[in-house]
Image: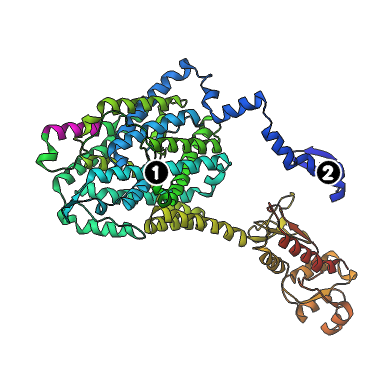
Amino acid sequence: MGTTYRSGKYRVERDLLDEEGLEAIAQRKIYSDTHPRLTERLKDSLRCTVPKLKQRIVHSLPVLYWLPRYSIWEYGMPDLISGISVGIMHLPQGMAYSLLASLPPVFGLYTSLYPALVYFFFGTSRHISIGTFAVLSIMVGGVTERLAPDSNFLIANGTNLTAGQVDIQARDLYRVQVAAATTVLGGLIQVVLGLVRFGFVGTYLSEPLVRAYTTAAAAHAVVAQLKYIFGVSPKRFSGPLSLVYTLVDVCSLLTKTHLPTLVVSAVSMTFLISAKELNSFLSPKLPVPIPVELITIVAATLISSYTQLSSNLTISVVGEIPSGLSPPSLPNVHVFGEVVGDSFALAIVGYAISISLGKTFALKHGYKVDSNQELVALGLSNAVGGFFQCYSVCSSMSRSLIQESTGGKTQMAGIVSAVIVLVTILKLGPLFQELPKAVLAAIVFVNLKGMFKQYSDIPQLWRNNKIDLAVWLVTWVATMLFNLDLGLAASIVFALLTVIFRTQLPTYSVLGQIPGTDLYEDIETHRGVREIPGITIFRSSSTVYFANADLYLEALKEKNGGGNGTVFVIPDSARHADEQGRWEYLKGGAPDCASLGSVSELQDEGSSSEDTLSRDLERVSLGSLGKWTWDVHSIVLDLSTANFIDTVAIKTLRSVSSSLSCLND
């Protein structure tokens, strides 16, 4: 074997090897060497040594690995600045997103505190911010409103129900129990999936699916906030088309819009949008972003308190926010059976969002995120948080970007942000009792702007990949019409069907050589390639298995010159170069007398076509492929794209081999 170099070209020479020769040289290991027996694997997993125990503990508690190596001088100040910035964002987002979950605002603050503390010990991503997120909040809101609607908590007056009077305290208490139970169950699902190494489950949610799902969820969030924006009280709908029914009901109530509430909403949104645009413009010159949401809620609270908006203009406000931390409590296990589907959906969606963000930052900053450990960390954050009246959490894109852009280096930034939230809960919570709910709804509206920008995916996918576009559109339509849980299930099923579709209907091609190289391309899509005389190279863009084996055989017949037919064998005297070119002209078509006669004229001018046929050609039957044998003497099946093969495909390839064996007779 040798390699010759010359003026930018190379030529490789090596001996031709068959399977036996290759095995003799490579010396394949025996199966038992590469695949230990089950008993041996069990013994190895149960064998306990000090180094192995230490490795398991460090793997389960990543904080034990990075915290002893933490450099205060190098990471302390960046993490402090980043943590304060993210903590300030937690306050308005926690209270605003709790409205999406149909819970009192203080529980949004709890959700911003406890899960972040748990993730500090178990998480492997250095830059994601765990806490409330709009998509999960609206999913939780769908569960709480379904199991605890207002109609179940009407105040009874003797034997009658007081019209329109709802026991808000009892309703909110039960909704908190439902949200906590859903969160604990979802967290346990995530922990179990992580322990059994199911971290790859997030890969089944492709990027087009996730982006379309979050876009549709943003639409659900907007519709859910319309009642706070306009100050109306629409009916509560559930099931398929509930989004449409709710939107129609809100539109029918527009004539009853509470104008002071609408003015507060409009002013808040105008200020938020203007300030955020200014923030983006000045971001290169600012060490930390301006806390626009915090400024908004502080200003709105002060104005509302001094002008008595709630009493003078009947504007709905947040209301009582208890100071201090609530004690842990057991979840209401009686609702587990009713929320198991919702919990599973929350577990999968939350993990998919978190791991995608975590891997993005890890790739950018050169470290590794363990997908299985992330699943466990997120599950423990939810499971533990549920005992403290938190609802489902995942990473937030906006807060994570702030944590990364302000210089955050490690998970220590999450602890700093949690301290900010803790101080607010203990000392500052009651100060926000006069905050109008319309302001929180405006914050939700403006923060969803980034998700609505994802509609620009549609023209991009149209240009790049139609199947991905179909996944995007089906996911969006299903989520809009069937709600978030059923929409997610339908989207995953459709995405998996597209995988089958891609493998069942691949692209089949015949390859030709690029002159002067050892490179091969499709002869139908490249003008400059030429088939090697006498050889057909057939390639499929997908693996061969039971779902496409018959299609593979049919495509091979078609690319190889047709179906069943008669083969005309040319005698050796007619196979020199000039005549070969004429014979190749007939490839893929049925020969007629004129064509055959023109070829025979090269051998014996003046003789008739019938004489030529009887003298020069011998008719033989080819079986299934029907190939003109003077054109091809060898067929190469390019299986470089096959990453697996099944018994049906093996039988198909054997059939091809048997059908082509007559070419060697």
Residue with the mark numbered 2:
13
Write down the quadrant of residue 621 in the picture.
Answer: bottom right
Mark 1: secondary structure:
helix
Compared with residue 364, is residue 162 higher up or lower down, i.e. above or below?
below
Question: Magenta includes 304?
Answer: yes
Q: Residues within 10 Å of mark 1 (few under 14, many from 20)?
A: many
- Among all residues in the image, which is located at the extreme front? 158
> Does residue 180 appear left or right of residue 633 in this picture?
left
- Measure the C-alpha gap from mark 2 to mark 1: 68 Å
Residue 562 in magenta?
no
Residue 485 can be seen, yes or no? yes
**Nearer-the-camera pick, 441 or 509:** 441
Magenta-tinted stretch:
295-306
Residue 654 percent across, percent down from the top left: 78, 63
Image coords of residue 634 (percent x, y): 81, 62
Considering only order in the chain, which callout, 1 or 2, is on the residue closer to the N terminus? Answer: 2
Q: Which residue is mark 1?
A: 181
Please say whether residue 452 is visible from this viewpoint: no
Camera-side residue of 205 and 372: 372
Residue 438 location, quadrant: top left
Q: Is residue 48 left or right of residue 119?
A: right
Identify the residue shown where x is 79% and y is 67%: 631
Disc 2 is placed on an element classified as: strand
What amino acid is found at the position of numbered circle 2 in the picture? Glu
Q: Nearer the viewer, mark 2 or mark 1?
A: 1
**What secondary structure predominates along the stretch shown in magenta?**
helix
**Residue 38, numbered circle:** none
